[in-house]
Structure formats: C-alpha cells, structure tokens
Image (cartoon, helix red, strand yellow):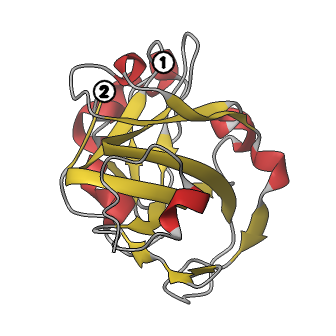
Amino acid sequence: TQVGNITLVSLITCLTSQSSTWTPDVGLQYYRDQNLRAPKGIEGESRLAVDENAETCSQTWRETSPWWRVDFEAPRLVISLRIYYRTDVDEGELDGFNVYVGGSVRSWDDNPPCAMNVNITQGNLSASPDATSRVGVGWVDVWCQAEGRYLYVVIPGINRSLALCEVLVDGLSNARSNAIAGILPNCTACLSG
C-alpha cells in the first residue's frame, strides 16, 4: 500500500489475545443462552484473526464490550486496517466497533481511540483474502492514523459478541522519513532521516 511516496508494510504479528474465547466443545451447551449459532470456521481463538485465512474466525462469548488485541512488540505507526467479518451469522453484530491504538496492555480504554463507531454497512462483500470462493465474508476498511504498541478492536455495549475473520493492519514499523510528519504529527516512533 502506498501513502504518497511512502510504502506501508503489514504490521500484524501472532501476538494476539481477546476478552474471552468461545469454543465449540463448551459452546454447544450454551448456544441458547449465548444466542450464537455454530457456523463453520468459528473456533474462537484470537490467533484465527491473523492466520491469513478468512475461512476461520476468532470469536468471543456474549459479554460487555468484548475486545480483540494485537501486540506489535514495539511502538508502530498504524495508518489503516481492513477487517474481514462474517455475514452469515449476524451481519449487524460488528456494527459500531471502535479501534484503539496505544501503549497500554492493561485495558483498551487506557489507549486513545483512532476510529469510533465504525459501521460495517460502509464495507464490502467478497471472497476471502486467500482467494478461495466463499459466500458470507465481508470487509470494511478503516483509516486509522495512530501510534502505539497495541491495537484493540472493541464492540461497546452489553450482550455483544466479537467475531473477526481476518485483521490486516498497514503502517510503518521503523519510519525514517521526514514525510512521516505529514501523516502523523508528534509521532515518537518516527525517526527523521
């Protein structure tokens, strides 16, 4: 991805976590209480949102303000993200999500927001990013200019469940360009060069 004369890189690592993990073996007995169906591919683990396969998805239990987090292992400049979600479960479930980027691992709300109340009706429907044909996958692109080590995706509210099929983050890992100042002023991870 290009922003002006700057080439962005993928920032996703395998260091992910989430507020809770829905599992099929335990989940079967809780479908009625949790109001969840068992669509193919949902296994629950947070790492499934970065496995480069939109056929598998992370999934939380229904809870208050469920979240998913990635640790970049060092401060990074985040420019944008694309979130793949399921459209064959409850298409409106992801509506109104927020993105936070910052330096606190303790809680998502200790970090500044970089995108608020994102509506998935602004998104697209297509095949999965690994080019396998599949119905029921959509994506939404989010412009998010922020700096931090941790990125959180949160759905605020009570009795919400968060399912992410793939999260792609573009940004700069070690920026060495004066052009960065035009993208994100006051960036402490950006090095002049």
Number of marks drawn: 2
How far across and down, in percent of the image, does residue 82 sit?
58, 62
The residue indicated by pointer 2 is 19
Residue at x-position 40% and y-position 46%: 147
Q: Is disc 2 placed on a helix, strand or loop?
A: loop
Q: Residue furthest right?
A: 121
The residue indicated by pointer 1 is 65
Residue at x-position 59% and y-position 55%: 85
Tag 2: residue type? Answer: Ser
Above or below 89: residue 13: below
Tag 1: residue type? Answer: Ser
Crowding around mark 2 (Cα neighbors within 10 Å: few <14, some 14 to 19, many 20+) is some
Q: Nearer the viewer, residue 64 or 149?
A: 149
Badge 1 or badge 2: first in the primary sequence: 2
Residue 120 visible, this orientation: yes
Q: Nearer the viewer, residue 142 or 172?
A: 172
Question: Mark 1–mark 2 contact, CB under 8 Å?
Answer: yes
Above or below 156: residue 78: below
How far across and down, in percent of the image, does residue 168 sit?
46, 65
How far across and down, in percent of the image, does residue 77 sit?
40, 56
**Is 193 left, or right, of 93 in this rendering?**
left
How far across and down, in percent of the image, does residue 43 sit?
32, 51
